[in-house]
Image (tube, rainbow, N blue to C red):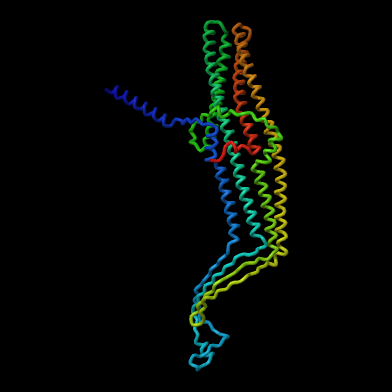
Amino acid sequence: MRHNIYKFGTIAAGLLLTAALQASAQETKNLSLDEAVQLSLQNSKQLKLSRAKIDDATATLREARDNQLPDIKASGAYLRVNNPNVDLKVKLGSSSGSGSGESQQSTIKVDQAAYALVNASLPLFSGLRIHYGIQSAKYLSEAAKLDADNDREAVIQNTISAYSNIYKAKRQVDLVNENLNQAKQRVKDFSNLEQNGIIARNDLLKTQLQESNVELTLLDAQNEYKIATINMDLMLGLPENTEIVPDSASFQYSADTRNLSDWEQAALQNRNDIAALTFREKAAFANVRATKGEYYPGLALTGGYIAADIPNLLTITNAINGGIGLQYNLGSLWKTGAKVAQAKAKVQQVLANEEMLNDQVRIQISQAYQNYLVAQKKIDVYNTAVEQAKENYKITNNKYTNNLVTTTDLLEADVAQLQAKLNYAFAQVDAMIAYKKLLQTAGLLSAQYPKK
């Protein structure tokens, strides 16, 4: 009876352990490159910051436009006062015809007062400060949107690189694992040969050493794959234990035959950072004009309403006024010059940044284009290397069977074959990354991933 209870408890514990392991097991997610890019765009913290900057620039533009609207100020107060000495310059008459004005003034007692004021002002002319202020804010708002588009391209490129790293790591794990199975089989075969006295024990030890080295390589490859997966999960907003399985079809693309001058022209026409800097140049010039507007007076349409009540003394109602007001700060004659100089200096900074950016674009395009050409050539070279490594291993294996080469030669041929396969697999991925980088440098990457 006790034996049955013990057996039942063991089975139950095993089932619970199995269920716990399944619950904590990694979720496997098959993910294409396009799906990864869309997830990254949805969850990118950089793009959230970019959207906040756009909202800030839009609010600044609205604030500049609101300066065209009238200002309306209202104020009022209720006051308690002591018994002041009231001396009216206008003498009060007597309703009964008796007494003097002085005696009536002495009877006036003021201990409280209340008043209300409403003033309105609509700017008619402000030295064009409002007009050019709106223009400057509008240009800066457009520049913020282009900055966000530029950040979007950077997020896409980072996602492509991270996705490629996962694919490389996964491909390396698969190839090394395949090589490890071959190494284990070779150790098994050599062990049988050594037991039968056909080969020396030293040859068996060499194969066992290679098996250990391959196992260490596999551990490193698995570690790199896990790190790349965690990085990708955080980028895409997925749980950190999600195992991403990349799609090899995502790395297929058609070769582009455009030359260097075509890519440079495309970059000058489509780069968001160049367009953003152009808008900043316009904003800087508009700011110069707005600053010069401080030399001129301000003209505004004004109006107001006044009401007051001082018991026993004065009551004012329906006191409405309107007119045109002129305001000019004489200090602007000698203070505005420094402000204009600062605004012009900012224009020169923007112009200098434009020249520097144009040079950087040409350098970046040249570098990205050359990297793309080299990456394409590497595919052909490594493809040939794979065939050569296979043939070399085949010949070396035949020679080893006929005792014409040593075990070391055979193992070296096997390692060369594995390295050639890895180089070819990585070269295909690197060529795609180089092409995407070229598209990003030319400002054409976002077009492949339109906004939804």
Residue lying furthest left in this view? Answer: 1
| Quarter occupied by the N terminus | top left
Q: Quadrant of residue 264?
A: top right
Could you tell me residue 270's position as x and y percent? 65, 41
Residue 130 position (above or below residue 426) = below
Looking at the image, the residue that sits furthest to the bottom is 98
Indicate the position of residue 278 as horizontal and vertical percent values.
67, 47
Residue in view at x 69 percent, y 64 percent:
296
Task: Name the spot of residue 250 as percent of width and height, x first.
Answer: 56, 29
Could you tell me which residue is drawn at 67 percent across and 67 percent down?
Answer: 328
Question: In the rendered image of this protein, does residue 71 appear above or below residue 165?
Answer: below
* As drawn, 203 above or below 11: above
Viewer can see residue 408: no
17 displayed left or right of 240: left
Q: Is residue 343 visible?
A: yes
**10 or 249, nearer to the observer:** 249
Q: Foreground: 266 or 421?
A: 266
Residue at left offset 56%, top offset 13%: 205
Q: Nearer the viewer, residue 214 or 421?
A: 421
> Where, by quadrant of the figure, is residue 33 drawn?
top right
333 left or right of 406 in image:
right
Q: How many marks?
A: 0
Q: Position of residue 76 (x, y in %)?
A: 52, 71
